[in-house]
Image: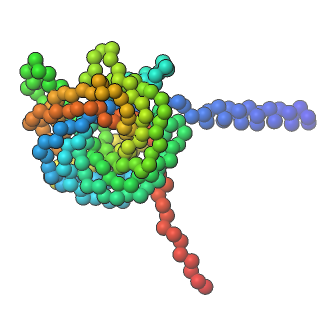
Amino acid sequence: MLRALFSTALLLYGLTTLGSVTAQPTDKNPAEAVLNHFLCYRIKETKFGPLPLSLQDQFSEKPLPRVVTLRRLLCNPASKKEEGKEDPHAPSAGDAHLVCYMIPNDPLDAQVRVTNQLYRKEQPLRLFTERYLCVPSGKQLIRDEENPPQEPPPIPTDIDHFKCYSFKRAPTRLGTYLVKDQLDDDDHKIPISGLRAAFLCNPVDKEKNGEPPTRRIHDFAHLVCYDFNYHASDVRSATVRIANQLETPNSNLHIRGPDYLCIPSTKVWRQPHPPSRRVRP
């Protein structure tokens, strides 16, 4: 009898231990499997739009009409490494770029919790306004000594469109990170510090008149974009051509920066429930 009780207790202990081991989370954020880091540059303002379309993400129950106005950012795939650590994160999810366009600053009040390589535990952040529509784009770097390519850059199809929202009173992340993208020499990396969350980008469905709608691919994979401090000697500029679903490469664009580092992230948002109404007997 005692032996049977002991065997049962040992079996239960083993199952409990096995369950606790298999439930441990991994260090890699699932968004990193489908998204790169991005280093974003300001685009010198040129004529574009207005362009009407409709957008629907996790914050809206139906497509919402929006008007795209200005090109604002070009985001290159980038690598990131925390200073003093041997764990660099290089681009591994293709060569897709993002071009971010201004949309009206419609208000939004939403509390979210995000996790990524900077914050392994959920970080609460509050969103308060719409900011950008970021569109998957192909990019060609135009060098002074080279003739521009005849063929337009291919438009990527394996990355989502993103609708981005500004954060309210985000904290600053301590530490120094080394970042590098396609504009850097082989050995040069930019030290950046004082990272502060500026905006969150949700995967979004896009509908434009006369074209098939573009649906979300990876609903779980978001981007949190951080502004940062860096030395003035690391400011760079370049001339590029872009192609995406909103425009063809009909002119050269000038970029300068960088301004933001976007990091693959996951997000938790609990939709608020309307207050219950007490019914009197």
Q: Nearer the viewer, residue 156 or 177?
A: 177
Q: Describe residue 259's horizontal placement relative to residue 195 as left or right.
A: left
Q: Where is residue 269 in the image (x, y as percent from the top left)?
A: 47, 51
Residue 27 in sight here: yes
Judged from this view, the residue extending furthest toward the top is 187
Give the residue at x 12% y 38%: 248
Query: On the image, which quarter does residue 81 sit in?
Result: top left
Judged from this view, the residue extending furthest toward the front is 232
Residue 30 in sight here: no
Q: Where is residue 273 in the image (x, y as percent from the top left)?
A: 49, 64
Judged from this view, the residue extending furthest toward the bottom is 281
Please tell me whether residue 231 is drawn above or below residue 133 in the rendered image. above
Query: On the image, which quarter does residue 101 sit in?
Result: top left
Q: Position of residue 231 (x, y in %)?
A: 34, 27
Give the residue at x 51% y 69%: 275
Q: Describe residue 144's horizontal placement relative to residue 183 as left or right.
A: left
Q: Nearer the viewer, residue 35 or 240?
A: 240
Give the residue at x 35% y 52%: 57
Judged from this view, the residue extending furthest toward the right is 1
* Picture quarter with the N terminus: top right
Q: Where is residue 255 in the image (x, y as percent from the top left)?
A: 20, 33
Q: Nearer the viewer, residue 256 or 210?
A: 256
